[in-house]
Amino acid sequence: MSLYLDYNATAPLCREAKQAMLEAMEWVGNGSSVHQFGRQVRQKIEQARQEVADFFKTSSSSVIFTSGATEANHLALCGFEGRIIVSAVEHDSVDQARPDRLVCPVDARGILDLTALEALLKKGNAPVLVSVMAANNETGVIQPLEQVVNLAKQYGAFVHCDAVQAIGRLPFSWEGIDLISLSAHKLGGPQGVGALVMQTDIPVKPQLRGGGQERSFRSGTENFLGIVGFAAALKVVKDQDWVAIEQVRDTLETRLKALCPDALFLVQEAHRLPNTAVLVMKGVKSATQVMNFDLAGIAVSAGAACASGKVKSSKVLKAMGVPGELADCSLRVSLGPTSQMDVIDRFLEVWMDIYERAHVSSQ
């Protein structure tokens, strides 16, 4: 029995996105061409743009299509001329975008330290951009965006949010957030497409120059197939209910604790995504766990999936103060919208097999 429990890395392409892309394959034309074929493709791109804008209750001119969230993050941060403040648990595409960024610490739950943020906001002059993700890709911990926005606005700062993990999983108000980064493949769309939603007239300079596409914010022929698939997937996640998935996650944790009292659960008490659990199998390295789960047909991960294809120490857990011996034995389980209780038995069976074999061999 194969199980895919790595939805925070990528979600399977949903039926609606696949169908939209198959239909788009019948069209020919470059959206920048002035003839009727180009105009027809342009019309489809603009229709998709409006659908993304509708999700955020903003205008279509606010949506800039990109190759994914990494490019969207870089456009937001590298295109901003001023001071940058990021949280200590941001995705590497935010954390490494600007070497001159100021880093705001988090507490033991991975939640932004608002007192420290205010101290950073007080330093220096405007303009300032605060970049805080909606929910962490490794732990699922949800940040207090409303409080971040209110604090930033008190000091005249702009706010950027990497919303990749939150879209379709959480009921969020995006009011007051100036820039929002999106990725299609996290919500059932295709890989290789995303967007930056610019909610206000924030000064951002383009990073890719040339043909002037995307209102000159992002030159280059648009990924037509990806864009229509992205918009189709976004429609689907509007109606997804994650209550049952949260119950599956909580039941998995409860049963694992009863079966293996030695197991630990990180950020269990924090406000987190309904599909995400971080488990610690003491004495067994993360890489060993991932490999053995894979051999058993179960896909899980440790750390950020797009870091390099390798399992390495988590800077997120380090920023939270998690001891290295626990962080190095952590595992992320991320469920999907169709995950059901029947995944638990198989997961626990493999967990116990890995745990028992590792501890027998160490004796």
Image (spheres, rainbow, N blue to C red):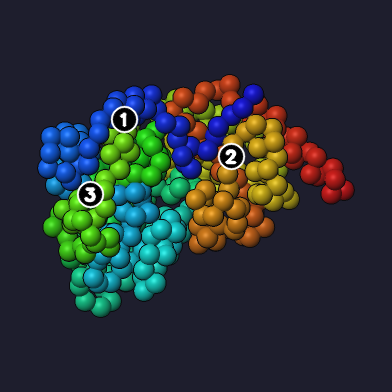
Q: Which mark is residue 25?
A: 1
Between 225 and 39, the residue placed more toward the observer is 39
Of the residues tagged 1 and 3, which is closer to the observer?
Answer: 1
Question: Residue 6 at x, y = what percent?
Answer: 52, 38
Q: Name above or below for residue 314 compared with residue 4.
A: below
| Residue at (33% x, 38% y) in the render | 226
Horizontal and vertical percent position of residue 363:
87, 48
- Residue 52 visible, this orientation: yes
Q: Residues within 10 Å of mark 1 (few under 14, many from 20)?
A: few
Identify the residue position indicated by label 3 in the image. 64
- Residue ID at (55%, 34%): 5
Badge 2 crowding class, 10 Å Cα cut-off, few under 14, some 14 to 19, many 20 or more, is many
Residue shown at 32%/33% (left/top)? 229
Amino acid type, callout 1:
Met
What residue is pinned by disc 2? 300
What is the spatial separation of the Cα atoms under label 1 and label 2, in whole angstroms?
Answer: 33 Å
Q: Residue at x 46, y 39 (%)?
A: 10
Q: Position of residue 68 (x, y in %)?
A: 35, 48
* In the image, residue 323 above or below residue 277: below
Between 19 and 6, the one lying in front of the other is: 19
**What SS does tag 1 mark?**
loop
Callouts 1 and 3 close, C-beta under 8 Å: no
Where residue 186 appears, x then y in whole percent?
41, 40
63 vs 352, nearest the viewer:
63
Foreground: disc 3 or disc 2: 3
Q: What residue occupies the far bottom of the structure in this picture?
A: 124
For residue 342, which quarter of the picture?
top right
N-terminal of the pair, mark 1 or mark 2, is 1
Can residue 241 be seen here? The reply is no
Task: Compute the Cα span from label 1 to label 3.
Answer: 22 Å
